[in-house]
Image: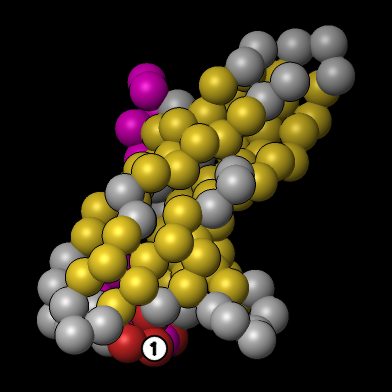
């Protein structure tokens, strides 16, 4: 089984920064895409940023220039650097990964989420 564990959320003032981390563990043979999604209260989950195994990235228009996604393949970890936070960034942030695991083959898993609250 593959598990994703996020960390780094918290309460931050507008204009502040946070760095989210997501570590994948299990009998992983390879990880393909990794990404960050968020779900604000009363809204649907939306994609924030994604990164391929080769490092190609794409971002939601609402976060371009403020969020940076990166990954450390040796550590099976994906990061999300969040700068210039706005109140509308308040949400639960989820990590997602796809790849190949021993025995079962393809996997697609979500983390449990980490809460980011932007408020003065």
- Residue at (83% x, 11% y) in the render: 103
Q: Residue 30, how many percent across, how many down?
A: 60, 23
- Residue at (38% x, 44% y) in the render: 7
- In the image, is 89 to the left or to the right of 18? right
Which residue is disc 1 drawn over?
A: 88
- Compared with 24, 89 (above or below) is below
Is residue 109 visible to the viewer in this orientation of the structure? yes
- Compared with 82, 55 (above or below) is above
Secondary structure of residue under mark 1: helix
Name the colour scheme.
secondary structure
- Compared with 68, 79 (above or below) is above
The range drawn in magenta is 62-75
Q: Residue 41, how many percent across, how many down?
A: 58, 81
Q: Residue 82, how many percent across, how many down?
A: 26, 66
- In the image, is 114 to the left or to the right of 117? right
Q: Residue 17, how many percent across, how many down?
A: 17, 66
Which sits in the foreground, 110 or 116?
Answer: 116
- Compared with 15, 5 (above or below) is above
Which sits in the foreground, 7 or 110?
Answer: 7
Q: Is residue 67 magenta?
A: yes
Q: Can you name the residue that lies furthest to the right here?
A: 104
Is residue 83 visible to the viewer in this orientation of the structure? no
């Amino acid at each position: 089984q593959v598990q994703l564990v996020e960390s780094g959320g918290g309460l931050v003032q507008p204009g502040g920064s946070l760095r989210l981390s997501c570590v994948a563990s299990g009998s992983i043979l390879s990880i393909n895409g990794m990404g960050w999604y968020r779900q604000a209260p009363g809204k649907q989950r939306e994609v924030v940023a994604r990164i391929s195994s080769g490092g190609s990235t794409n971002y939601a228009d609402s976060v371009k220039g403020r969020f940076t996604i990166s990954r450390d393949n040796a550590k099976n970890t994906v990061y999300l650097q969040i700068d210039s936070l706005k109140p509308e960034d308040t949400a639960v942030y989820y990590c997602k990964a796809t790849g190949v695991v021993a025995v079962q083959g393809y996997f697609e898993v979500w983390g449990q989420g980490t809460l980011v609250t932007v408020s003065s």
